[in-house]
Amino acid sequence: MTAPVLRACEVTKVYGGTHALKGVDFAVAPGRVTALFGENGAGKSTLMKILAGIEQPTTGHVELDGRPVRLRSSRQAADEGIAIIHQELSLCPNLSICDNLFLAREARTTWGAVDRKAQRAATVEVLERLEEHADPDRPVGDLRLGQQQLVEIARALLQNARVLIMDEPTSALTAPEVEVLFRVIGELTAAGVAVVYISHHLDEALAIADHVVVLRDGALVATAEAAQVDLRWIVEQMVGRDQDALFPDREPVLGREALTVRDLTVADPAIPDRLAVDKLSLTVREGEIVGVYGLMGSGRTELLETLAGRLRPASGEVLLAGTPLDEPGVRERIGRGVVLVPEDRQRDGLVQTMSVAQNLSLAAIGAYVRGLFVSQPRERAAVDRAIADVTVKTSGAQAEIGSLSGGNQQKVIIGKALLTGPRVLLLDEPSRGVDVGAKADIFALMADRARDGLAVLFSTSDAEEALHIPDRLLVLARGALVGEYRRGELTREELMRVSDGGTQEARS
């Protein structure tokens, strides 16, 4: 194999009493894709931050082209040809796409002024390379999540890096966008770029990888050539259990209709002349888990946000236990017992300046008010109970929310929703950007709450989740319901065909 271009040698990282990395040896070679697997908290992001100059190792060192190097900042790493695409977006929503791509690295004219013409031309070129046709002058905050992720990728591509680290680059991308990204990765490796690819979509990462590395609890536990392993091997190395154990086995006990939707029509918030949801009807019963599967643009997010009171419908009605939900607004819907776990946890689900406890109790804070003050003992007891119920791994309730892994942050948001005492729980892509172990915990939590009589409606773009988790699956295409199936009635191939607008007779 070609000599490594970048290597971590016996790297250890300690935060207080936590050993995030334990003597890890990790190397990447030019022209190859190295897939890095591990659960949330396994040390993947910490290792990548060290390689990108964002963090410094406690012990051990980094080698570049065989020579020891101390990368004291991300800018120094970028100057050495190391670029990173972070799992959580680091964009400025108030700035344009073009300004985001060149932020702190502006192109200059001969006279030292910002060369906006050159920047705009480069922006158009890199967006075309990614087959994204957004206006370079459009504010990033106006883009959907997948488009923002493409902007993050475009920014890294413009650095012409020798080593490109991709931490969850496809978590919000559509299948066609993933295909485009894979083509670009192929072009990069053909030109000699070393790529580190981190993804919780294991099949996707394995398909593009040349070499695989698995971390568990901060230690490197397995390496192999990608052609020699399969998904089952990867899962077992990551979590120490069989892949089949990740999906809960359950027989639902159904109660009365909890949520009823009749002929719901919702305009697209970004394009009002387009319908995001088109005369859609559905029901969810107490004790039932209903899944909504669809590709990007199918209307699944707009559907859930309308049910949660964030968007207003153009027509149709929504009923809770037979009573119309006419009150607009998220607060009003929470008060009636309908609560949403949003897709974008950083923007819509968490308050970054608050602790774990404050984030958990925020939506239900009114329940702990006595007179003019919040009853801290009641709030503290509820928070402690929620942390235990949803199995949040944290150093304590007062820990900063940013100190948690992505999977544990997601559990906090679910715990926050459950503390409101909902009758209907809505979850928009609840497993986005979390590892297989955290996914299993989230699915088990959904199953437990359904057994307690909660009605659960969740959306997913993951075919395996769609086929294995819901008791009943609704398939959307271009805002319309195109199929309804019970678990076990649909194959992956049929699901792909139906969601793309093909015909497949729904079974009752």
Image (cartoon, helix red, strand yellow):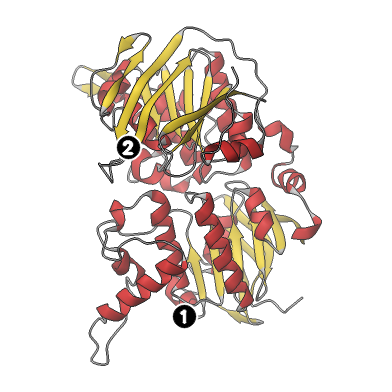
Farthest residue toward the right? 228
Badge number at residue 433:
none
Is the C terminus in the top left, top right, bottom left or bottom right quadrant? Answer: top right
Circle 2 residues within 10 Å: few <14, some 14–19, many ≥20? some
Mark-to-mark CA distance, 1 and 2: 46 Å
Percent position (x, y) of residue 410? Answer: 47, 38
Percent position (x, y) of residue 245? Answer: 71, 32
Is residue 434 shown left or right of residue 300?
Answer: right
Q: Report the residue marked by disc 2.
A: 275
Q: Residue at x 43, y 27 (%)?
A: 426
Seen from the viewer's position, the closer of residues 484 and 102 is 484
Q: What kind of residue is marked 1?
A: Asp
Of the residues under marks 1 and 2, which one precedes in the sequence? 1
Q: Report the residue marked by disc 1.
A: 79
* Residue 168 visible, this orientation: no
Q: What kind of residue is marked 2?
A: Leu
Percent position (x, y) of residue 162? Answer: 56, 77
Q: Residue at x 37, y 62 (%)?
A: 133
